[in-house]
Image: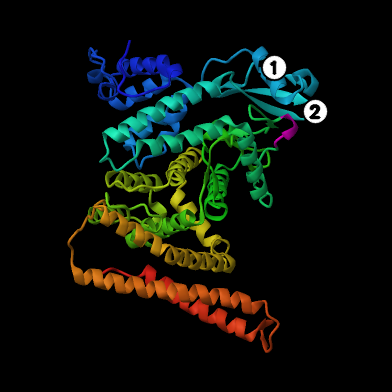
């Protein structure tokens, strides 16, 4: 009987003991030593097999929770090394299928109707079998061809039990290694949300429906319909798409499709998701993108999606613009705006490596730059200097790398940097339309007012901690004149930003007032304030783009 260093529920003791045995089997001795008092005989595997491979093999053997955990963890290259992330991304989500009779029972239990009541045909052999569910071809009574996804029996209970164990491990390691800049519990919490989201087929259906709404005016991208009458938390019924998966390159060529056009179309559809919708497909691998007979593309499998709030969308735009203008300062300011940099970050070392990265990458023109190389280099520096990025951003980075890989499989000359640059030029008016700028200005003012209103509370909290001798100060001595200059510059820029935002709102309000005289069909005062706003806004924009710290 094991004596564990951590507390787990009685019902999870046997499972935890099994997990420890698997850790030992794959030579993860350092972790086992932290979790148990067991004396472990070394089997020498650590000298024969690389660490990253052993972790992947271990997760694969431990089943659905650890497979999903590893797949989602592979997107977090800000907190794990790139080599380990690459290895975890190869985790196979294929398992032996469960009996179709069990699938029939689950369908009736969830939908309230038998398979015979709903379908004229339901294939006995599943199309695919994964760790969470399996997929069948079927035909509805009205003749519609559909795909039916049915969740594995008891998988939710298994996953919840494993997540309880992972939380117990994470909390223990957090207490043991308090000085670490990363909270294990927060990482497990974040990834567990993603896993539990994939357990709810209702959520996947809602994701697909939202994509269908977002692309309703774009005839080049097709999203399958969800049949809600036959969909529940454990059953998903969606329209079957007849097309060629992008992974079948030779078949696409044999059919005579324009592969350059398809590669560009896939990249543009993704850019639209990122820069305009702020909502993107999180798993666009070649099996989830289909080429239709009229050279449109269809997207399927919406279990993993990414969401960009307005702050993150602004940072992503800033990041791409910084790549175009080769401006490191834009990246640093963007990271500070989303609070990715804290006291654990060696800011000077971090900025120095970013400058070096830009110098090395931009020997060639932007159109010839390898976007995957840029993103990997960027994330390696992020990991090295403990810069904490939101999970949706790291998912976006992995997805961008996947998109570039898919594009190159279709067209060896495809470059995501060139496609992104073209998309930004062609769609600048949609990305930076005056309404979004006014809204962003208003939101910035609202945030500033909120911060000012919260200042007394924060000051009171600091004073209370100071009184209780519970306040740690970290001070770095650098040139005080430079600090003064930077503070003056930031203050002036902030004041001008608030003025521009206020004038934007005033201009929008004046435009709604019926006030003479008119010019170009608009109230003169509204037109005047709009012109002043544009001039000041452009001045502010150029001062930010071309500013270089002294």
Is 206 positioned to the left or the right of 88 in the image? right
Find disc 1 in the rendering and name its residue.
104
Q: Residues within 10 Å of mark 1 (few under 14, many from 20)?
A: some
Residue at 68% from the left image edge and 49% from the top image edge:
216
Q: Which residues are magenta?
A: 226-230
Q: Quadrant of residue 151?
A: top right
Does label 2 or label 1 sit earlier along the sequence? 1
Dot 1 falls on a residue whose secondary structure is helix
Please state which of the two labelled residues, at mark 2 or mark 1, is closer to the viewer. 1
Q: Nearer the viewer, residue 520 or 161?
A: 161
Please determine whether, in this image, residue 404 is positioned above or below residue 35: below
Quadrant occupied by the C terminus: bottom left
Please determine whether, in this image, residue 548 is positioned above or below residue 346: below
Dot 2 falls on a residue whose secondary structure is loop
Does the magenta stretch mainly form a helix, a strand or a loop? Answer: helix
What number of labels is visible? 2
Q: Residues within 10 Å of mark 2 (few under 14, many from 20)?
A: few
Please determine whether, in this image, residue 490 is positioned above or below residue 347: below
Q: Position of residue 504 (x, y in %)?
A: 54, 74
Q: Residue furthest right?
A: 142
> Disc 2 and disc 1: Cα gap in Å?
20 Å
Q: Quadrant of residue 72?
A: top left
Q: Nearer the viewer, residue 547 or 439?
A: 439
Q: Position of residue 176 (x, y in %)?
A: 27, 33
Find disc 2 in the rendering and name its residue.
143
Q: Is residue 292 visible?
A: yes
Q: Quadrant of residue 543?
A: bottom left
- Residue 53 located within the stretch drawn in magenta: no
Q: Nearer the viewer, residue 453 or 99?
A: 453
Is 191 positioned to the left or the right of 97 in the image? left
Residue at 35% from the left image edge and 36% from the top image edge:
184
């Amino acid at each position: 009987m094991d004596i564990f260093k951590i507390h787990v529920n009685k019902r999870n003791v046997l499972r935890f003991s099994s997990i420890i045995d698997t850790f030992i089997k794959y030579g993860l001795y350092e972790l086992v030593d932290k979790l148990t008092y067991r004396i472990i005989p070394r089997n020498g595997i650590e000298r024969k097999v690389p660490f990253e491979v052993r972790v992947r093999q271990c997760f694969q053997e431990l089943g659905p929770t650890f497979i999903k955990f590893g797949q989602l963890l592979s997107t977090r290259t800000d907190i794990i090394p790139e080599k380990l992330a690459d290895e975890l991304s190869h985790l196979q989500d294929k398992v032996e299928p469960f009996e179709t009779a069990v699938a029939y029972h689950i369908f009736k239990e969830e939908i309230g109707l038998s398979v015979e009541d709903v379908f004229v045909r339901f294939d006995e052999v599943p199309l695919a079998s994964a760790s969470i569910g399996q997929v069948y071809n079927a035909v509805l009574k009205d003749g519609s061809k559909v795909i039916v996804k049915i969740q594995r029996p008891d998988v939710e209970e298994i996953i919840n039990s494993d997540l309880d164990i992972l939380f117990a491990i994470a909390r223990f390691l957090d207490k043991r290694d308090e000085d670490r800049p990363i909270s294990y519990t927060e990482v497990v919490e974040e990834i567990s949300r993603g896993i539990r989201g994939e357990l709810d087929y209702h959520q996947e259906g809602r994701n697909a429906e939202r994509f269908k709404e977002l692309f309703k005016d774009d005839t080049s991208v097709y999203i399958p319909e969800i049949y809600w009458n036959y969909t529940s938390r454990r059953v998903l019924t969606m329209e079957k798409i007849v097309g060629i998966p992008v992974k079948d390159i030779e078949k696409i060529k044999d059919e005579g499709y324009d592969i350059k056009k398809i590669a560009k179309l896939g990249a543009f559809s993704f850019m639209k998701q990122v820069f305009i919708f702020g909502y993107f497909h999180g798993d666009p691998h070649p099996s989830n993108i289909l080429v239709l007979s009229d050279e449109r593309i269809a997207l399927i499998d919406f279990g993993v999606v990414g969401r960009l709030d307005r702050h993150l969308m602004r940072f992503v735009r800033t990041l791409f613009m910084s790549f175009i203008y080769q401006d490191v300062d834009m990246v640093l300011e963007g990271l500070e705006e989303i609070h990715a940099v804290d006291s654990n970050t060696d800011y000077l070392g971090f900025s120095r490596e970013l400058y070096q990265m830009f110098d090395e990458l931009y020997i060639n023109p932007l159109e010839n730059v390898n976007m995957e190389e840029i993103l990997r280099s960027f994330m390696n520096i992020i990991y090295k200097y403990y810069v904490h990025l939101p999970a949706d951003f790291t998912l976006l980075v992995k997805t961008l790398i996947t998109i570039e890989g898919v594009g190159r499989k279709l067209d060896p000359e495809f470059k995501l940097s060139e496609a992104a640059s073209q998309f930004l030029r062609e769609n600048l008016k949609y990305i930076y339309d005056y309404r979004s700028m006014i809204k962003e200005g208003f939101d910035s003012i609202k945030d500033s007012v909120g911060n000012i209103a919260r200042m007394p509370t924060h000051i009171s909290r600091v004073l209370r901690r100071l009184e209780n001798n519970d306040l740690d100060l970290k001070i770095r001595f650098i040139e005080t004149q430079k600090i003064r200059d930077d503070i003056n510059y930031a203050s002036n820029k902030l004041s001008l930003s608030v003025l521009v935002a206020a004038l934007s709102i005033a201009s929008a309000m004046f435009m709604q007032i019926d006030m003479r005289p008119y010019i170009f069909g608009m109230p003169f005062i509204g037109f005047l304030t709009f012109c002043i706003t544009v001039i000041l806004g452009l001045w502010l924009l150029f001062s930010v783009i071309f500013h270089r710290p002294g």
